[in-house]
Image (spheres, helix red, strand yellow):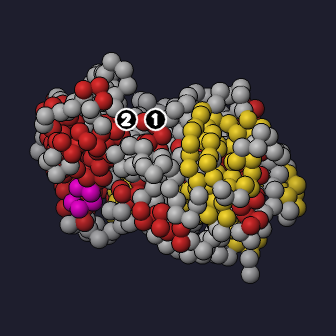
Amino acid sequence: MKRTLGTCYYPEHWPEALWPQDAERMVEAGLTWVRIGEFCWSRIEPKEGEFNWDWLDRSIEVLGNAGLKVVLGTPTATPPKWVADKHPDMFAVDIDGKPRGFGSRRHYCFSHAGYFAESERIVRAFAERYGQNPHVAAWQTDNEYGCHDTIYSYSASAKTAFQAWLSAEFGGDIDALNRAWGNVFWSMEYNNFSQIELPNLTVTEPNPAHVHAFKRFSSDQVVAYNKMQVDTIRAQSDRPIAHNYMGRVTDFDHYKVGDDLEIASWDSYPLGFLEDRVEASDEHKRAFAHQGDPDFQAFHHDIYRAVGKGRWWIMEQQPGPVNWAPYNPSPLPGMVRFWTWEAFAHGAEAVCYFRWRQAPFAQEQLHAGMLRPDSQDAEAIVEARQVRDELQSAPDVAPAQAPIALVFDYEAEWSWAVQPQGQGLSYFQLVFDTYRALRKLGQSVDIVPPSCTDLTGYSAIFAPGIMHLNDDLKQALSAADGTAVYGPRTAARDAHFNIPNPLPPAIDGLDIVVSRLETLRPDMPIALNGKGHVIRYFEELNTSEPIMMETSANQPVLVGQNGQLYCAAWLDDDGMMAMVEQVCEISGITTVELPIGVRRRETATETFWFNHNSHASETPVGTIGAADFVKRSRN
C-alpha cells in the first residue's frame, strides 16, 4: 500500500476565492487526501428540511479538480441548534444527573431515538448526494466517539434502552438477572426489568455487575449508532469508510465498531497526550515535552492496526502546539516529519495533518495548523514537504508479523475500572507498561484482540489482566506454539462479574490458585530477588509450578513451564524489563536494551531506529540526531 499524506480542511470557514489557492498549495505540499464536512451540518441544513448544498458541491469540485481526494465526514458530532430545540431531551446526562448542553460539540445521547433518526436522515442525505461523486474517495463517520467523556449517558432515554438491552441479554428472565448479579446482596432483587435504574446517584457504590453491564450496554449503543451510519452510506457508495478514534479513550469496544468499517484511523496528538493522558514522572514529561512519549503513539498505532485488520490511518496528526492540554509546548524542529515516519513504520497508509489553516475564531484559535491564520507557511508544511520528497524513493507500506503479540481487551479495561481495588489501577496502564518494556528491548509488537483465535507465528504472547478470559482466547493461548504469559487478574471474574469456582486463574495445564490478593501503597513496593519491585497489585499463589521470578521473601511472582507462564504481580519498570527479557530468552527472541528514548520498529522491508530525545543518541546503528531517525533496508 502506498504511503500518502493529507490534511483536514474547513471550506466553510474561508472565503470561496481562497479555495483554489488552498487546493493548489495542498497539491504542491504533496498531499493526497483532504477531510472535510464533519462539522458543517448547520451550513448544509440551516433549518429543518432546507438544504444548502451548493457551497459543499463547489468545494468538493475545487479540491477534486486540483487532483485531491476527499474524505467526506458525516456531520453528526455537531447537531445544529434547531435539532436540539426539536429534541430538547437529546442531550447526554452526566453521572451526577446534570444534562450536557448546546454550545460546543458531541452534544447528544447515543440512546435517544429522535436523534438517532435525525442522524440517519442527514447521513442518508449526504450519501445520496455524494455517494457516487468521483472526488469523494472515502468517508468518515461522525467524529471522535467518546471525546469529552460522551459515551456514558444517564438520561431517561439511556435508562429505557438499558432496560430493553438487559431484557434481551437475559431472555426476559428477571430471576436470571438477579441470580447472575447476586442481587440477594443488600436486598437488590428486582421483580421486572422496568425497575432497574442506571448505576449512578446511589448512596454508596452500586453493584459491580450492574456497572459492568451498563458499560457493555453503552459500548453496544455506539456500535449500533456507527453501524447505522455505515449501512446508510453503503446503500449509496462503495468507497471505504473510516472512523477517527482517540488516544486512551476506551469507553467503547473499538474492535466491534471496526468490524463495520474498512479503515481504522486515529487522531494523534503526542504533546497534548503526554501532558493529559500519559502516566509518567515530571522528569519524564520534561524530557519529552517537545517530542511526546516514546511509546504512547506507537501503542495506539499498533492498536488501530488491529482494529482496522491491517488498514489504518492517522486522520489528525498534531502539526504544532495544541490548545486543550494542561500545557501546550511547541514540537521540536523535525517532530512533524518524525511522527509521520513513525506512523508509516507501523503500517499507516495515510497521515493527515490537523488542520490546514489555524482558525482565527472560536474554540480552537490556539490550535496550530499547517498554515498560520494569515495563510503564511507554518513549520508543519515545511516538514510535510520534506516527507513528500522522501516518499519519492520510499517503498510502499509492507507490514510484517511481529515476533510478539500483546492482547488488548476493552472489556477488561471496563472491568478494572469497575473494581480497581486500588487507587489509580487501570488495565490500560498494565498493558502499556508491558508494551513499553518490550519496546525498550528493541521489539516490534502486534496488538491482537481478545477474539483472536489464531496465534500462529508468534514466539511470545502476553495477555495480562484479562479479567474475563473467553473460552476461544483461552483455548488459543493454551494451544499457542509460542510462550503464553498470563496475569495478573487473569480470569478473575465470569461474564457477569462473579468470582468463578474453581478459583482463578483456572488455566488448563497450570497448577495455580490465587489464594489472596493485595493492592500496595505507592510507598510500599515489594522487592524482587534481582532487579525491580512488585508495585500496585500482588497475588499470593498456591502452586507447584516451577518458580522463575520471586520476591526477596521467596513468594512466587512468575511461574510455569511448557510455554504457559503466569505473572502474579504488577511490576515496576526494572521488574517488568527483567520479566519480559526472561520470557524473550526462553522464547528464542533476541533482545537489545536500547538507550533511553530510542526505539526500533521493523516492517517487511525496513528497520527504523527512532531517537525521541532532544539530544543526539548513540545507538546500535550509530549516532542519531535529536528528534531524528534512520531506516535500513532488511534485504
Q: Is residue 593 left or right of residue 430?
A: right
Badge 2 vs badge 1, beta-carbon distance below 8 Å: yes
Image coords of residue 158 (percent x, y): 22, 36
Image coords of residue 404 (percent x, y): 63, 65
Mark yes or no: residue 283 visible.
Answer: yes
Residue drawn at x 18%, y 55% as measured from the top left: 125
Sequence order check, earlier mark of 2 and 1: 2
* Corner quadrant of residue 284: top right
Residue drawn at x 36%, y 57% as measured from the top left: 256
447, 276: nearer the viewer = 447
SS of the residue under disc 1: loop
Image height of 537 relative to 407, above or below: above
Mark yes or no: residue 157 visible.
Answer: no
515, 376: nearer the viewer = 515
306, 510: nearer the viewer = 510
Q: What residue is disc 2 on?
A: 208
Residue drawn at x 36%, y 20% as measured from the top left: 204
User: What segment is highlighted magenta in the picture?
Assistant: 227-232
Q: Amino acid at mark 1?
A: Gln
* Corner quadrant of residue 539: top right
Residue 191 falls within the magenta-colored stretch? no
Label 2 environment density (alpha carbons within 10 Å; few <14, some 14–19, many ≥20): some
Q: What residue is disc 1 on?
A: 419
Q: Is residue 179 left or right of residue 445?
A: left
- The quadrant of the picture occupied by the C terminus is bottom right
Toward the bottom, the furthest residue is 635
438, 631: nearer the viewer = 438
